[in-house]
Amino acid sequence: MLERIRRAGPVSRAQIARETGLSKPTVSQALSTLERARLVREAGRTSGGKGPTALLYELNPAAGWVVGIDVGREYVRSAVADLTGKIVAQRRQAARARSARSLITTIGSVARAAAGSAGIGWRRVTVAAVGSPGVFGSAGHPLLAHNLPGWTREGVLDEIRRELATSVVFENDVNLAALGERWRGLGRDVDDFVYFHVGTGVGLGIVMRGELYKGANGAAGEVAYLPLATADPHDKANRRRGALETAIGADGVLSAARRAGLRGATTAAEVFEAARNGDQKARHAVGLVAEGIALGIAAIVPVLDPALVILGGGIGRNADLLRESLEQELRALSPFRPRIEVSSLGEEAELMGAVSLALGAAQDRLFSRMDGGRRVAV
């Protein structure tokens, strides 16, 4: 019920009853419980129409605060939000991390700086959600997080919890991007979609029936390891990074540029800039990368049948250069035609997903505190 109030804004008892299928007495009892816990508050009355007016209820924004944290190889970003999801502060800091310990220290300082800039004492933060590369399954540490130094060693997650000193939840960064699109992006009204991240790394966030799908061990969406594209799937190096990532990730763009005869480019961004300025060798390299992305999509679509494929990441967002070759190759490879769009949130997708995840966890945590710790069905 609290989630429905958060999403719908001020609502009446009757509206909640209709939308949830609960009886009006049950709704009234639940609202009274939420009011006593200061999680909801009255927000005026209905106006217009026939009949008596009805009380409206909304979330109490100050009932708790959440922090979303996005951890990358080059930066750490954080955002602070109230329980309605309103972002009140953001911070970004270059990571320059040479060890897991220094990166964890940066996580703590960036998160606290964001809260402090909004005048929120850290003790008032109910939940922090941390997103980073890696598979977060049953192990006590991320797996397959080769882009971050020391990130897969034992005890990393416990060290982050100690650094943040609040309730902490963890998730893969691409999964968070999918959650961000579901919350505030192109996936708001789409129950079945995928977020295809192509950047330094490659990954897939999967939303099925409106919920994030992670698989049995948290590895759903690790499409970097699909044995596709030009890389040799039996090459031992591809066991570490994955054949598809080797072909279409940032290093793959530079490799394609070298094969196309382009000289001087040292980053994927420089290759795309040269292509945008009309360099034919750079355009050829971008075309090769687009074909690799099409291979990935062609493999994904028959398995998941998404209504929408959202492209994200520093490479995936270059739709003006990628789309023509990508769609041409996809037509040649597959009879299926999902809608393909570029993320509307850009690099904010992961951070918005972290906030969304933290909001859900905060609601669960606040529920457990109601009525002396007894869980109440609201």
Image (cartoon, grey):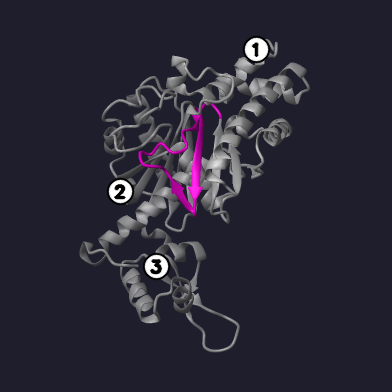
* Mark 3 vs mark 2: in front: 3
Tell me which label, 1 or 2, sits earlier in the chain.
2
- Reading the image, the residue beneath label 1 is 258
Horizontal and vertical percent for residue 47? 57, 80
Closer to the N terminus: mark 3 or mark 2?
3
- Please state the horizontal and vertical placement of residue 100, each as a whole percent of the image: 34, 25
Direction from residue 261 to residue 138 in the image, left or right: left
Q: Residues within 10 Å of mark 1 (few under 14, many from 20)?
A: some
Which residue position holds label 3? 40
Question: In percent of the image, x 47 and y 29: which residue is there?
Answer: 75
Apparent side of residue 318 relative to residue 200 in the rendered image (left or right): right
Instruction: Indicate yes or no whether the magenta region holds residue 212.
Output: yes
Q: Quadrant of residue 191?
A: bottom right
Q: Are marks 1 and 2 in contact (CB under 8 Å)?
A: no
Visible residue check, residue 80: no
- Tell me: residue 151, above or below residue 254: below
Q: Can residue 4 be seen at all in this image of the molecule?
A: yes
Q: Residues within 10 Å of mark 3 (few under 14, many from 20)?
A: many
- Which numbered circle lies on residue 159? none
At horizontal 51% and vertical 37% (from top left) the residue drawn is 204
- At label 1, which amino acid type do we have? Arg
Q: CA distance from mark 3 to mark 2?
A: 21 Å
Question: Callout 2, which amino acid?
Answer: Arg
What separation in Å lies between label 1 and label 2 (alpha carbons)?
52 Å
Is 228 or 250 nearer to us in this picture?
228
- The quarter of the rendered structure image containing the C terminus is bottom left
User: Which residues fall within the magenta stretch?
Assistant: 199-224
Residue tagged 2: 123
